[in-house]
Image (cartoon, rainbow, N blue to C red):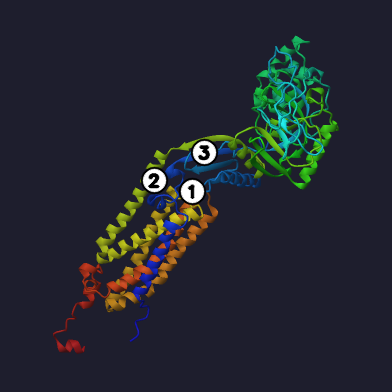
Amino acid sequence: MAPPQGQMRPGRQLAVLGFIFVVLYLLVFFAGANGSFKDRLEPKLGLDLIGGTRMTLEATNSVDGRPPTAENLEEARQIIESRVNGLGVAEAEVVTEGNRNIVISLPGENRNLDEVGSAAELRFRKVLKAADGSGTVAAPPAATPTPSGSAVPTPSGGATPTPSGSGAPKATSSPSGGQGGMAPASPSATPTPSASASPSAATPTPSASAEPVPASIEEQRKAVEQKVGAAAWQAANGLQAPADLTADPSLGDKLKPFGTLSPQEVAVLPAQMQFNVPTIGCAQLDKRPPASISEPKQQVVACEGGASKYLLDQAKVLGTDVDDADAVLDQTNSWVVSLDFSGEGQSKWTALTRESFNNEGQACDATALGQDGKCRVAVVLDNEIVSSPEIQGVLTGNSQITGNFNQKDASALAGQLRYGALPVTFEQQEAQNVTATLGASHLRAGLLAAGIGMLLVIIYSFFYYRLLGSVIFLSLILSALLVFGALVVLGRQIGFTLTLAGIAGMIVSLGVAADSFVIYFERLKDEIREGRSPRSAVPRAWIRARRTIISANAITLLSAVVLYVVSVGTVKGFAFALGLATVLDLVVVFLFRHPIMTMFARTRAFLSPRVSGLGRALPARNQPTQQPRNPRAKEA
């Protein structure tokens, strides 16, 4: 006789479930697993569970403070995420918040995130003039500007940087300190220190910018003019070269108010004024807001070493012309950043070195010349000069940024250049370290909440369904083991990180699982009340309840998918955990719950209402029907 419709063979289904468990936990213990037995059973935990670092960056599009576009903010988020992942932190979370902020969260050991949000706008600019950058009113301009690095290229493309001020030229192949310099990939020439010249001998230079000034910048300049006074502004605006305060001491008193300006106020001044006013020092220039000198078509002012300030030409080569950057050890076992230019970028770099070597185009002043009377090229990263090597030949090959780098600094700079310059600039607003102690307390609280939720479901199940409560208990245990194993494997394979939000999603899934039990068991009671035996009622109840269970779980799963797609941050973790637990609950429903119910239906205990938990369904079926005493009443 064929089995009733809907009857399944429980042995096969339980065997399939056992096979799934074996495969899953083989992956847990052997697939990419390292460390002790305990370590192999640990899923990846998020920032709120094990501690870590969270930093908030506020974006600005330029010095005038305009908000960035949504496209630029998303592009910046992707670049920052690439930089963070380049540090080997695959579980990092980088999300946008509002229309200005990007939030970076890194679980685990505290890490330095200062570099990942820097704009890394690389510019190669010819040095036009040099002046003292101390900002001291009483002191005259420095007689000898000392750039921190020089490079001596040869027509074949060879060059090696060395810091200036080292005395007479020496034959050497590596830098010996200082901030750094530019060199080809295979240095072969002799470095020389920079030349000495008086900044007062600087010749007038055309206006720093022929570009139209935005209205907001003009308004800020007027505010600065009112702050320093009309006399000081007029005196500064009339300077055609760095003021010599020794020749005119009274000029120092007029220009003294510029020394009290904030870095933000200094940033809106014209480049010529920033350079020519001696009371504006490097202390102010170095602290200007990000993107203050990022415009490539304008002349700008920047400092090197905190003591010398340079007037720099337009940027002829940009960071976007660099095709690749790597931190490598040079022949002297020093860390350098190797630059691989793109095809067009290499042409630009060759043209810039040719212009500097021949002093063509915008001529560099005597204060900007090196020891051999050649112009220098400043390597400008954001608002700072990394090095300013002298150009003694036309460089036709790739180059290196050299300096006093360690491996960490060189790798950070190479990563910034490799992944590109950010389309917007950022200011750090908040940096928070979540301690491991606080994370552990969060983890205990989350696990306690999950345990309490499961315990309440089990207590209710045994109280209301009795023997059937054991089915609910075993199903929840199996679901928990499947979810735990899946979390460990997914953490290794795709970097899924469990957070408090994820634990909340799993707690919610307990309610979904309990609903499927209620649907099945109540349908079973209805079948028995209709006069069917427990053995035949189980498969029939399964057939009728199965569609409802699938529909309810499908709605929950669809909600989790939609939430995962449209959400960001920890909400994604909640949606992923809810969807994962729902799918695995369906596996347990089909491969354990119905087979075990089929086996229970064949036992004697299942027929007892006090043991089975079927309530009055069985007594209503087994109660004998009373016959009427009056035969006529029976006929009627």
Question: Which element type, helix, strand or loop, lies under badge 2?
Answer: helix
In which quadrant will I find the N terminus?
Answer: bottom left
Task: Tell me the mark number nearer the camera, choosing from 2 and 1.
Answer: 2
Within 10 Å of disc 3 (Cα), the crowding (few <14, some 14-19, many 20+) is some
Q: Earlier in the sequence, mark 1 or mark 3?
A: 3
Q: Residue 111, which numbered label?
A: 3
Instruction: Say whether residue 358 is visible.
Output: yes
Residue 454's spot in the image, x, y percent?
33, 55
C-alpha distance separating marks 2 and 3: 21 Å
In which quadrant will I find the C terminus?
Answer: bottom left
Q: Who is closer to the viewer here, 12 or 408?
A: 408
- In terms of image quadrants, where is residue 582? bottom left
Specify the amino acid type for callout 1. Answer: Thr
Q: Is 547 placed above or below 185 here?
A: below
Specify the amino acid type for callout 3. Answer: Arg
- Give the residue at the far front of this rendering: 171
User: Residue, x 51% and y 55% (percent of image)?
Assistant: 494
- Give the residue at the far left of this rendering: 629
User: Residue, x 70% and y 18% (percent of image)?
Assistant: 279
Residue 156's spot in the image, x, y percent?
80, 39
Q: Is 228 placed above or below 512 here?
A: above
C-alpha distance separating marks 1 and 3: 20 Å
Which residue corresponds to mark 2? 443
Question: Which element type, helix, strand or loop, lies under badge 1?
Answer: helix
Q: Residue 570, which numbered label?
A: 1
Q: Are marks 2 and 3 in contact (CB under 8 Å)?
A: no
Question: Which element type, helix, strand or loop, lies under badge 3?
Answer: loop
Specify the amino acid type for callout 2. Answer: Leu
Task: Tell me the mark number nearer the camera, choosing from 2 and 3.
Answer: 3
Residue 344's spot in the image, x, y percent?
78, 46
Residue 613's spot in the image, x, y percent?
25, 67
